[in-house]
Image: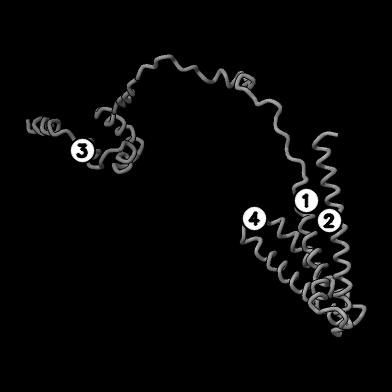
Amino acid sequence: MSRPAGRRWVAIVAILGTAAIGVGAFWLSFRALSDLASRAGIPGELGWVWAAIVDGVIVTSTVAAVALDKAGWRAVWFAWLLLALSAAVSVVANVVHAILSTDGSIDAILVGAIAAVPPLVLLAMTHLTVVVVRHARPAAEPLAEPLREADIQLPDFLIQGFDAPSASPSPTRPRRPKAIALPSTADLRSRAEVLRAGGLSNSQIARELGVHKSTVGRWFLPDTSEVSDTEEDNDE
């Protein structure tokens, strides 16, 4: 038998054993609590409900405390509080029932100690069962051989996308951005005349060409030399 299979069988036997002992302890505590509930005035057909609540909280809070163990104290503190309170109630109730049921032939301390065994065993077996189940899960088997870099095959399109670095890379100076050729004044004025012929105002032409409105106004002023020559011709 292999070692993992042997560990699995040991875990199964441990789970079955702890579960059987837990069931026996639960039954003894359950009978005592049911009888005590009947003595306290709870109807006989409902006494078992009170017993199931007390011992049931022990089982569920133990499972919750183990399941939330790695979640931090903020998540698990309430489960531990319920576990402590329910265990204390169960132990005290079992002791009280045993003292009330005895005829006085046995010392009360011994009676209480014997009666406290079932709820304490129930608590211990429930916790042990959950721990065994959690640690009996098979762990992930490691890889037979670690991957080597040579075993990793990359697609061709990834290999072609990378260039091998040169042995001695030479430092390269950053290239200066090329100067953008700005349009000349003559070009702007010609463009302005075309826009003026299209019916645009000086403000619209200035926004279109990125110049000031006064500049566009100066472009369209009449030439003074031409005006003076015209006036001389009229005088003659």
Between the residue at mark 1 and the residue at mark 3, the CA separation in whole angstroms equals 97 Å
Residue at x 78% of width, y 63% of height: 123
- Per the image, the residue denoted by label 4 is 71
Q: Residue at x 64, y 60 (%)?
A: 75
Q: Position of residue 34 (x, y in %)?
A: 88, 76
In front here: 216 or 23? 23
* Among numbered discs 1 and 3, the one appearing first in the sequence: 1
Q: Which residue is labeled 1 in the image?
A: 132
Find the residue positioned furthest to the right: 45
Pointer 1: residues within 10 angstroms few (<14), some, or many (20+)?
Answer: some
- The count of marks equals 4
Q: Rate crowding at label 2 as few (under 14), some (14 to 19) or many (20 or more) other CA atoms within 10 Å.
A: many
Residue type marked 2: Thr
> Can residue 38 be seen from the camera position used here?
no
Residue indicated by mark 3: 218
Mark 3 or 4, closer to the camera: 4
Residues at discs 1 and 2 in contact (Cβ within 8 Å): yes
Q: Amino acid at mark 1?
A: Val
Q: Mark 1 or 2 closer to N-term?
A: 2
Horizontally, residue 222 falls left or right of residue 129, namely left
Q: Rounded to the nearest whole Å, what is the CA distance between mark 2 and mark 4? A: 26 Å
**Sooner in the amino-acid sequence: mark 2 or mark 4:** 2
Question: In terms of depth relative to the viewer, which is nearer, 96 or 165?
Answer: 96
Q: Observer-nearest residue: 150 or 107?
A: 107
The local secondary structure at tag 3 comes to: helix
